[in-house]
């Protein structure tokens, strides 16, 4: 849908305008004007619109995990738009604008790959190629058929099942890498520590994702847990999801140790939301 594809770039434009319209102090904190808050809120509303269409798409595909995430981001986006327009305290507005900066960087590194076929297909091709190389290193004989299909070299497997492993954009870990890019480079901190946090997050995520793809494919081709389809389900939907969650928690911990400003940002956001709810209840 053209509107859905356009909405994230509209949000990026609003986010950028919101940050540029702010007055930047020497400590790197953005102090927003009324106009900056307005366009920032419009950016979050645009992003919420994208999440709405993404929710409908995931429901049609019966992908309830992604549907849940899309709904969470939709609610979060509307909440930030509301908070940005209603807060009157300078520090609170600065906090939401810092979150907006994180969102801007994340969106810039994610949506070009998700919405432009050339970029997305290139990333998929590279990921599929590296995953096939990893499988061969693990002594699982495979070959790749561009742009994204991985086949077993076992003739007996082909005779019975014939279906390859197909790498899609979600298999590239671009979502997680873009999120960490936003968090690492969105907070105010010395560039040296930002680069260290980047090195322990984004490249590590991509490398572990290649290993994840290879292990899921190996389970499928080698039939580790019974039939290929059952083996794929166990490896992809259970083991890989658990492993990915543990890895992301460990990586996030490493980032927070190197870049405590990122943890402070998250704590400040929850503190602000809780304070806002308490104020409304008292009123």
Image (tube, grey):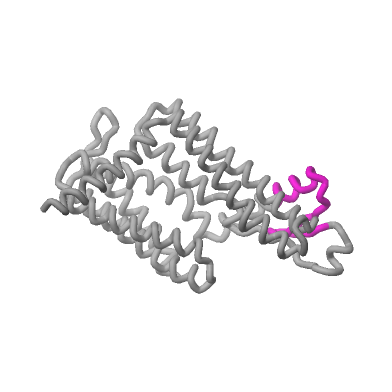
How far from the left and from the top, in percent, is residue 66?
49, 61
Query: Which residue lies at the image location 34% right of the left edge and 54% below the top edge?
Result: 13
- Residue 32: which quarter of the image? top left
Relative height, residue 71 to residue 62 (above, below): above
Q: Nearer the viewer, residue 263 or 40?
A: 263
Query: Which residue lies at the image location 38% right of the left edge and 48% below the top edge?
Result: 103
Q: Is residue 172 magenta?
A: no
Query: Which residue lies at the image location 17% right of the left edge and 53% below the top edge?
Result: 86
Q: In the orientation shown, which residue stands out farthest toward the bottom? A: 60
In the visual, does 281 lie left or right of 207? Answer: left
Q: Is residue 137 magenta?
A: yes
Q: Which residues are magenta?
A: 129-152
- Residue 225: which quarter of the image? bottom right
In the visual, does 77 lie left or right of 222? Answer: left
How far from the left and from the top, in percent, is residue 181?
46, 41
Relative height, residue 31 to residue 120 (above, below): above
Report the label total: 0
Q: Nearer the viewer, residue 172 or 21?
A: 172
Q: In the orientation shown, which residue stands out farthest toward the left? A: 283
Q: In the orientation shown, which residue stands out farthest toward the right? A: 155
How far from the left and from the top, in percent, is residue 140?
81, 50
Q: Nearer the viewer, residue 188 or 139?
A: 139
How far from the left and from the top, in percent, is residue 88?
14, 46
């Amino acid at each position: 849908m053209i509107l859905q594809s356009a909405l994230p770039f509209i949000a990026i434009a609003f986010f950028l305008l919101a940050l540029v319209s702010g007055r930047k102090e020497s400590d790197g904190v953005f102090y927003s004007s009324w106009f900056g808050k307005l366009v920032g809120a419009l950016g979050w509303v645009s992003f919420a619109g994208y999440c709405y269409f993404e929710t409908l798409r995931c429901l049609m595909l019966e992908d309830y995990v992604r549907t849940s995430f899309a709904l969470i981001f939709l609610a979060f986006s509307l909440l930030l738009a509301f908070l940005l327009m209603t807060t009157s305290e300078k520090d609170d507005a600065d906090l939401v604008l810092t979150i907006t900066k994180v969102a801007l960087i994340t969106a810039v590194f994610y949506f070009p790959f998700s919405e432009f076929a050339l970029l997305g297909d290139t990333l998929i091709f590279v990921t599929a190629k590296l995953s096939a190389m990893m499988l061969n290193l693990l002594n699982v004989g495979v070959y790749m058929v561009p742009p994204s299909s991985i086949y077993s070299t076992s003739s007996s497997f082909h005779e019975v099942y014939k279906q390859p492993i197909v790498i899609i954009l979600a298999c590239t870990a671009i979502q997680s890498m873009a999120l960490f890019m936003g968090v690492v480079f969105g907070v105010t901190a010395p560039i040296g520590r930002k680069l260290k946090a980047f090195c322990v997050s984004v490249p590590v995520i991509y490398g572990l994702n290649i290993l994840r793809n290879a292990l899921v494919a190996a389970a499928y081709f080698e039939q580790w847990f019974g039939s290929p389809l059952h083996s794929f389900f166990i490896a992809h939907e259970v083991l890989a999801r658990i492993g990915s969650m543990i890895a992301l928690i460990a990586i996030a911990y490493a980032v927070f140790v190197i870049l405590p400003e990122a943890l402070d940002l998250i704590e400040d956001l929850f503190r602000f939301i809780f304070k806002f709810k308490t104020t409304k209840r008292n009123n």
